[in-house]
Amino acid sequence: MRQSYLTEPLVMLATVLQWLALATLAGALVGTGCSAFLRILFATSDHIYAAPLWVQMAVLPIGGLANGLLLQYGKRLNRTGLKDSVIIAVNDQHGALPWKTLWVKPVATLITLGCGGSAGKEGPCSHLGGSIASGLGELLGLNSELRRRMVACGVSAGFAAVFGTPIAGALYGVEMLAIGRIRHNFLFPAIVASVTSYEVSRFWGVPYPRIDVSFVGDFTELLFLKTVAIGILCGAVAWVFIELLHGSRRLFTRLRDRLHIPEPLMPAIGGVVLAGLILVIPYDYMGLSLPLMDRALQGEPMPYLGFLWKALLVAVTLGSGFYGGLITEQFVMGAVVGGAFAHLLALQPALGAAVGLVAVVAAASNTPIAAILMGVELLGGDSTLYVAGACIAAYLIVGHRSVYPEQQIAATKS
Amino acid sequence: MRQSYLTEPLVMLATVLQWLALATLAGALVGTGCSAFLRILFATSDHIYAAPLWVQMAVLPIGGLANGLLLQYGKRLNRTGLKDSVIIAVNDQHGALPWKTLWVKPVATLITLGCGGSAGKEGPCSHLGGSIASGLGELLGLNSELRRRMVACGVSAGFAAVFGTPIAGALYGVEMLAIGRIRHNFLFPAIVASVTSYEVSRFWGVPYPRIDVSFVGDFTELLFLKTVAIGILCGAVAWVFIELLHGSRRLFTRLRDRLHIPEPLMPAIGGVVLAGLILVIPYDYMGLSLPLMDRALQGEPMPYLGFLWKALLVAVTLGSGFYGGLITEQFVMGAVVGGAFAHLLALQPALGAAVGLVAVVAAASNTPIAAILMGVELLGGDSTLYVAGACIAAYLIVGHRSVYPEQQIAATKS
């Protein structure tokens, strides 16, 4: 430690200034890209529910086919041999991502959500973020270690833009790269890029509604145990969701292999299944389901098994090969299940929904610390005591499974 | 992953319930122990400043001698061969700590702060916490892995009781064990123990004043860059503090070796030096200096080099062999330096002080995420955007040094 007495602070200062420049630039570009995507998304999604039921049913398989053809085209377009996954890019591809296919996942998501498929909106943002930052890193001739960090900070910036939670977004982008580890050396780039991306997105007019749930009142040990109980429940919900999602993927793959169905047709078949399901499942569970989430957060009564409808629709949508994000639905399921079960624990439903909202994310994405900070940024600082126990309990209960199959296990949980 | 399909959630549920029981018990005991210590401390510290100057000067060497004799006696009392450090206990001693000497560090701290030495109050609390939890683990016959986790959760519970910030305390206890790593499998025990310890301490009447700094107003990219600048400054302050502290330790050790001075006499010599220093240095910098910190947080003007007075007094106090905590002074230095330099960046002094408060801790203790959560719990959720960039920048600038020399480097920063 001695020899670095005077040089180390200068090296660290250079690191800080370097990443201030690189991550601010990346954050500004990612924020602009995500803002464009989000504004198109807000203009196109959730309109289909105004149409007659037969139109909704007809549009789903068509959207599926469009998704299948688009993703197939994207695969052909990518001749780099690189996998199109940000987690793999950071962990195994030295921060390299295919550039040409940048637009494929965002457009596929617009189609999925525009035609009523059930999924999230953050997948394409984190993907856009990672790809833009990776491209910027290549353009600037960064070495592979710096480029990996660029991708991670781009991903964080994407999450910050889509959630409107810069610090939680930054942590999510760093924590989701592996189970049970936070790379402290990724944190500064991630936070700089996320804050910049968030500010730029606000500048471009992306709205970020704050959730208004009251956490005032005397926090007690009993209340803490109740939030841990909500966390255990949310961990179980995340477990069901992940198993359903991966089970559905396996099922559709087996079906394809057995019947030799061309891959682009699979989401169309998924669309047919979804068209059947919307005859039974209330339409609130389709698309992003944000109005449903808002109702849960306002304390309206929620059905005990509502989360299962959402999990099922997402499993069929994404399992059959539609592309879409993986997090909005975790928010929705968490809010629904927290709101439904709260009164059994003598908790206010809105409070249960708010705790559930972040606890399912902590579990399904294996990102407990990002989830706690999400609570801080979405629900206010007074929520910290309420969400912390729930998030870590949920994170434990779900075990070593994840919505991201490519997530590596850096540290076991038990 | 497949074979654990159904058994894993049950194993994880058992883990959650096991730690709910163990950590709640540990947290309740640690909270009670720390409350007793804190109430005695509040009754005895900071009274010396009402006495005439010559009394203050006379008491310092006497307190030093008492400290030296007590710590020497503690060393003789400990025949286990175990080091009396919680970080070493977790990393190298399978969670074992000497039990008989439990009271030595708290009593030494009471003497240090009672006679006007400059130090913190959390060292004995984390030590009490780790020791109580380690003893409980031994009593319950836990294996070494569980016992290590017990010590960590006891340390977290100690921090939660002394800071009044349960979630930040939990994270601090986990993050301070090594540089650049958070052990996710330590988080649940830490949070359960910390929340319990905090609730128990409130029950025993320990006061936790909330800091009232306004963070409302439109956050901008420019404001973010300014907070990063405060962070860089705080990193440099942490660097100066750590170098002064370790330099003073080396100097007193060399003096002892050269002149063959018996070890218990060293703090008495330190006391003589301190008695000389208080002729020059304003008395606000002695003891815990909490009134000074409060004034900085209220936006009162602070001297640019005020932090240096504090760093110097702490370096002499702890470097000569007084025992005391290492964190309160980080708060104080951060608030003083943040308040002093804020106006150069056209920031409100109170805001600069609040950001500095947590940023120096992020750097000197290498605990950036705990520091961000400390911001949330001490300053409110609106501070998150203001403190995050500052904390990580400070954490980088300080390099791979630490106030805890036994802290291992788990991941490099650059």
Image (spheres, coloured by chain):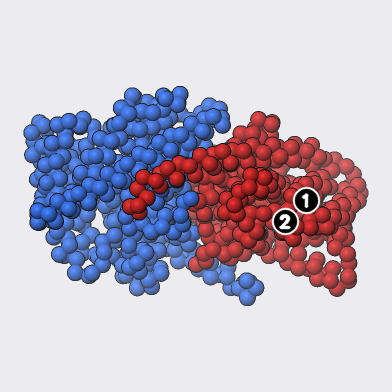
Chain colours: A blue, B red
Q: Earlier in the sequence, mark 1 or mark 2?
A: 2
Front residue of A19 and A398: A398
Identify which amino acid the numbered label 2 is placed on: Asp
Residue B94 relative to residue B287: left or right: left
Question: Alpha-carbon neighbours of circle 1 within 10 Å: few (<14), some, or many (≥20)?
Answer: some
Identify which amino acid the numbered label 1 is placed on: Thr
> Which numbered circle lies on residue B84?
2
On the question of residue B290 being in view, the answer is yes
On the question of residue B236 being in view, the answer is no
Element on which disc 1 rests: loop
Q: Quadrant of the N terminus of chain B?
A: bottom left
**What residue do we see at 13% from left, 36% from top?**
A276
Q: Return the x and y of residue A244 as percentages of the image width and height.
A: 27, 44
Q: Return the x and y of residue A49 as percentages of the image width and height.
A: 16, 33
Front residue of A317 and A305: A305
Front residue of A230 and B298: A230
Q: Return the x and y of residue B5 as percentages of the image width and height.
A: 35, 48
Element on which disc 2 rests: loop
Vertical comparison of B223 with A298: above or below: below
Front residue of A151 and A28: A151
**What residue do we see at 38% from left, 32% from top?**
A338
Q: Quadrant of residue B231?
A: bottom right
Residue B217 relative to residue B134: left or right: left
> Which numbered circle lies on residue B220?
none
**What residue do we see at 53% from left, 70% from top?**
A11
> Which chain is disc 1 placed on?
B
Q: Return the x and y of residue A104 as percentages of the image width and height.
A: 19, 56
Q: Are marks 1 and 2 on the same chain?
A: yes
> Which numbered circle lies on residue B101?
1
Question: Label 2 near label 1: C-beta < 8 Å?
Answer: yes
Residue A312 relative to residue B58: left or right: left
